[in-house]
Amino acid sequence: MARVLSLFRPLPFLVLAGRRKPTLCKMSMDSRAREVFVAAVEAVQPDTVVRQSIERKEDSVTIDGHKFTLKHNLHLVGFGKAVLGMAAEAEKIMGDHLVRGVISVPCGIQQTLQQHGKGHLLLKEKSRIKVMEGAKHNLPDADAQKAAEVIKQLTSELTEKDVLLVLISGGGSALLPAPIPPISLQDKLDVTRKLAAAGATIQELNTVRRALSFLKGGGLAHHAHPAQVFALILSDVIGDPLDLIASGPTVRSEVWPEEILSILERYKLLDSLPASVKDVLGRPGPRWKENTDESDTSGNVHNVVIGSNSLALKCAGRRARELGFRPVVLSPGVCGDVKSVSRLYGLLARFACSQEEPPPEIAAELLRLGPEVGVESWDLCRTMQVLDEGRTEGWGATCLLAGGEPTVELTGKGRGGRNQELALRVGLELKGLELPPKGPVFLSGGTDGQDGPTEAAGAITDSRLYDEAQAQGLNIDNFLTNNDSYTFFSHLSAGQRLLVPGLTCTNVMDVHMLLIPAIPINIC
């Protein structure tokens, strides 16, 4: 593996006069990590991303390079956890050209925003947008289904002179349930729950959801035809696949009954299907009757991802640079078991903090782990090259950034989430390295501000963690076995390591951050 890195390494000639001096900063590593996380969250605020994506000059509007004219012909629908703030900003921009709107948002969200001083994300009095709350506990319910019916009715009444603005964010699927009759909402829920319990992938789950829904898989765009449709999407899915975010209501996808039956048969669910589901899957032809002029609607529908994990990492990198770090983005698609992810970050920390040439075994294990956790070998080689150059040429402190959504195997009944457990496990991986500010600091935080059923978004850790826990009588292994990372960090040093940003009003998955101090170099 050393040979792999040597392909990227520049000539070993060090020009001291030209070496960049690190920016001095009096803030602690911990404080700077928190500042960078705040910058990531602020970059994907619902009102911010909408404001940055819509350009209006008088009655002319441009979205993602597509221009249209406002003629009191704009209609708006939306569904998702962050959609209320998105809609408030869109109405400010469009003014009285907005004819009407309907949005489906989580139960209690208006009161919650008001209580947390987030009034700027609420609609103004006499708004033309109707707010419908539903999906209590993030599950489709009768209130969400009623909202979906109102949204379907609005879109079905549009003409070729109209423009439909669709706002989509995480949680949108549960807030737009529209099962094809005679399927009941409960029947659809039962099928998807059984699939999930059987180990079906997110792709398989969404394929089945689309087959049983009027509005998912391009159904919303179909009902809006012949109007022009612009969908602004705040992504909470790795890779930003348009057909998976909220099950792709504005992304046309073919649904073949044979494919659905194959999935259900794979998980041995065919015999237990409700009669209503068997009825719908047994029907020939498409889910809806296609309009005669709808053979190609791609020109009428524009899907734009306006907020994502990549955007959050980009803006986090800017803030890191202001705070004296050289930002390096590893990947926005980290996934897989949290144990493997923590090992990856531990190895990267050891690779970066080594004052001598790192043992080739470290690079070899990193390249082996990469595919397990969603990181391409090329991204790892690129990152190791940069870290290697930083060490050999004395480039100063580095901020390694990544994002995604790792998973945790539940073995206990404690309180915690994937970010706090990841931080705890990385803390163990860092054992033996130097202490900050001469050693690395790791942060993992959920951009939605809530990691599992706790008030924390994540936690910050470093090489002191193990000894600190031992001194305070905390057995880390017991907490990990019980998936009780929140309780651990709450007790450790009075909760000082917890990351508690409060209500963030957004969600683009998680942000991972490894702060690496400037490594002293030996000059012969």
Image: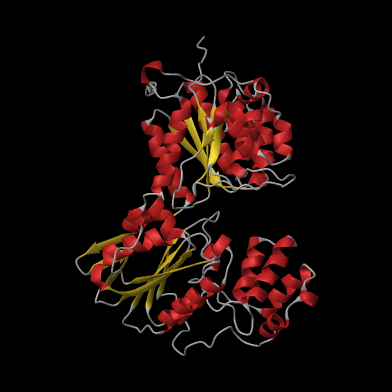
Q: Is residue 324 depicted above or below 508 in this figure?
A: above
Which residue does the image show at 51% across and 59% down from the upper left? 170
Q: Position of residue 297 (x, y in %)?
A: 44, 78
Q: Position of residue 231 (x, y in %)?
A: 42, 67
Q: Position of residue 280 (x, y in %)?
A: 66, 84
Q: Nearer the viewer, residue 186 or 284?
A: 186
Horizontal side, residue 272 vs residue 345: left or right? right
Which residue does the image show at 59% across and 21% down from the upper left? 354
Say which quadrant the N terminus sits in: top right
Residue at the top extreme, as displayed: 524
Q: Is residue 171 depicted above or below 513 in this figure?
A: below
Q: How is the image coloured?
A: secondary structure
Q: Nearer the viewer, residue 55 or 481?
A: 481
Residue 9 seen by the camera = no
Which residue does the image show at 69% across and 29% down from the upper left? 361
Residue at the left extreme, as displayed: 58
Residue at the bottom extreme, as displayed: 292
Horizontal side, residue 3 vs residue 96: left or right? right
Q: Quadrant of residue 174?
A: bottom right
Q: Quadrant of residue 60?
A: bottom left
Horizontal side, residue 328 vs residue 18: left or right? right
Q: Nearer the viewer, residue 88 or 170?
A: 88
Q: Is residue 251 depicted above or below 354 in this figure?
A: below
Residue 370 seen by the camera = yes
Q: Position of residue 14 (x, y in %)?
A: 45, 19
Labels in figure, total: 0
Q: Quadrant of residue 263?
A: bottom right
